Amino acid sequence: MKSIDSRKVFLITGGAGFIGSHLADALLQLGHFVRVIDDLSTGKIENIEHLLNHPRFHFARESITNELVLDRLASESDTIIHLAAAVGVKLIVERPVHTIETNVMGTRAVLRAALRYRCRTLLASSSEVYGKGNTLPFSEEDDVVLGPTSKCRWAYAQSKMIDESLGLAYHREFGLDVLAFRLFNTVGPRQTDQYGMVVPTFIRQALRNRPITVFGDGSQRRCFCYVEDVVAAIILLAEKYEVSGKVFNIGGEEETSILDLAQCIRQMTGSVSDIQVIPYSQAYGEGFEDMAYRKPNTHRIRDCVGWEPKYQLGEILGRIIDHEKYPQKNSRVVLQETEASSALRSSSVAHRLSYSSRLRPWHSSAGNGPEPAA
């Protein structure tokens, strides 16, 4: 099934992850159809559990490297938003082969499927691609300086640059409708702390009055962007066909040091936690390198689609703290079927696959993969 009227069919790879699940929520609220493929290696079924019975939502628990399942999903989709990736500093350092192969081969599989069915494709990339650049804020056309290949820390940045280059090559050579967006430290509810994501790690440590662990000396500066703002940016880009063949930064512009972030979170939670500064060598091993600054120039996306972030850091942290303290209060209710979707339901039911489908990993809701770190 392709689009009906103005309603489109979106395929989200890594859609059971942090960003992907919020994106699925938003697209369904806009009346679209959503398919998710996710092998749950870093995504969580809990992130999309409230959607499983939604008549316009479908979930396949499978890797994007399973080209049979990916082909079936792409054949029924108008737009692919490719979020699936190996992410998180801890995972990248511990499993560099997995990182490179998952990101590069996964993106190749997505682009091949998109080309077969001429799906509009949005590729998630990362601020990591700016490497050791010191021209701030980072702009999409800046030259890039990365660390040596002997430092596995840079494997993620290298893999995402290949992803971008491959996607843009498909656009130039085959005319495929492709764009890439670089995420800068996206944060919000549902984000895991398992792979070194700093905000959920600090908040959960503070709420438990455990030591807040700052890696490095804490002077590294970052800009954080709320997931609701990021999802809005992705949807705006998905709707704007004139921006194909380009790369866009998506991120907040309010800077803070990691040490100041830890102190702010401790104060906002009323925690008595100590703040422990841990050298990189102790956290990640000898020779680990990090970026001192990471700030986006967002003029391009603002000029092209009118996007800019709404939430400032204090409100972002307050929302995440509230979510962590009162998870039941903040749990999403199951999205209800609208009158319009009800009218379409009878015409689309024939396109849904049942749990007894020959494609075993496919799950139909009336009848997701990893996410990128930024």
Image (spheres, rainbow, N blue to C red):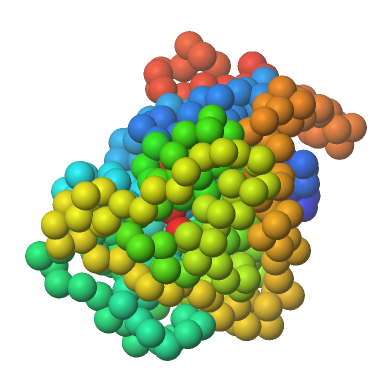
- For the point 47% across and 85% down, the residue is 136
Q: In this view, does 314 lie to the left or right of 285?
A: right
Q: In this view, does 35 lie above or below 87?
A: above
Q: Nearer the viewer, residue 78 or 248?
A: 248
Instruction: Give coordinates of residue 362: x percent, y percent.
Output: 47, 24
Quarter the C terminus occupies: bottom left
> Can residue 57 be seen in the rendering of this structure?
no
Q: Residue furthest left?
A: 150
Q: Quadrant of residue 38?
A: top left
Quarter the N terminus occupies: top right
- For the point 71% across and 45% down, the residue is 319
Instruction: Give coordinates of residue 133: x percent, y percent.
Output: 35, 82
Q: In this view, does 189 lie to the left or right of 182?
A: right
Instruction: Give coordinates of residue 237: x percent, y percent.
Output: 63, 66
- For the point 34% across and 87% down, the residue is 143
> Can residue 326 be seen in the rendering of this structure?
yes
Q: Nearer the viewer, residue 30 or 100?
A: 100
Q: Is residue 109 above or below residue 121?
A: above
Q: In this view, does 367 lie above or below 292?
A: above
Q: In which quarter of the image is residue 111?
A: bottom left
Q: In this view, does 193 lie to the left or right of 102?
A: right
Q: Residue furthest top?
A: 356
- For the point 25% across and 75% down, the residue is 146
